[in-house]
C-alpha cells in the first residue's frame, strides 16, 4: 500500500496486492470451507445416531412403564384380597369368641 500526496487531491491510497497473497488467502478460505463441510457431516451423523439412541430409550421407558403399571395393578388386587381375608378372619374370630 502506498500513500501518495497529489496537489489536486488530499490523499491518494494505492492498494497493490501480490498474487501469492491472493492465492494463499483463497486457498486458506477453501480449506476452511472444506473442513467446515466435513465437520458438519460428522455432526449430522452423530445427531442421527443420538436420535436412534433416544428413540430406543423411549421405547424401553414405555415398556418399563407398562410393566410397572401391570405390577401396581396386581399388587392392588393382592392387597384387596389380603384385606378381604383379614376382614373375614376378624369376623370368624368375633363369632367364635361369643
Image: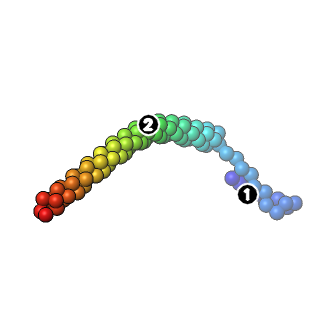
Measured as percent of width and height from the top left, residue 98 is found at 13, 63
Say which quarter of the image contains residue 83: bottom left
Measured as percent of width and height from the top left, residue 45 is found at 47, 36
Query: In the visual, does 80 lie left or right of 6?
Result: left
Query: In the visual, does 70 lie left or right of 4?
Result: left
User: Which element type, helix, strand or loop, lies under badge 1?
Assistant: strand
Q: Residue at x 40, y 39 (%)?
A: 59
Pick whichever of labels 2 and 1 is earlier in the sequence: 1
Residue 38 visible, this orientation = no
Q: Residue at x 47, y 37 (%)?
A: 48
Measured as percent of width and height from the top left, residue 19 is found at 64, 39
Q: Residues within 10 Å of mark 1 (few under 14, many from 20)?
A: few
Residue where numbered disc 1 is placed: 3
Q: Residue at x 17, y 56 (%)?
A: 92
Decide which of 97, 38 is in the foreground and name it: 97
Residue where numbered disc 2 is placed: 52
Residue 40 visible, this orientation = yes
Measured as percent of width and height from the top left, residue 41 is found at 51, 36
Amino acid at each position: 500500500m502506498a500513500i501518495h500526496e497529489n496537489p489536486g487531491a488530499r490523499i491518494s491510497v494505492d492498494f497493490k496486492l501480490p498474487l501469492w497473497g491472493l492465492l494463499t488467502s483463497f486457498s486458506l478460505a477453501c480449506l476452511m470451507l472444506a473442513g467446515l463441510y466435513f465437520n458438519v457431516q460428522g455432526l449430522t451423523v452423530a445427531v442421527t445416531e443420538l436420535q436412534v439412541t433416544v428413540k430406543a430409550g423411549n421405547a424401553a421407558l414405555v415398556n418399563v412403564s407398562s410393566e410397572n403399571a401391570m405390577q401396581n395393578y396386581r399388587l392392588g388386587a393382592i392387597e384387596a384380597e389380603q384385606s378381604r381375608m383379614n376382614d373375614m378372619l376378624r369376623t370368624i374370630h368375633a363369632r367364635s369368641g361369643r
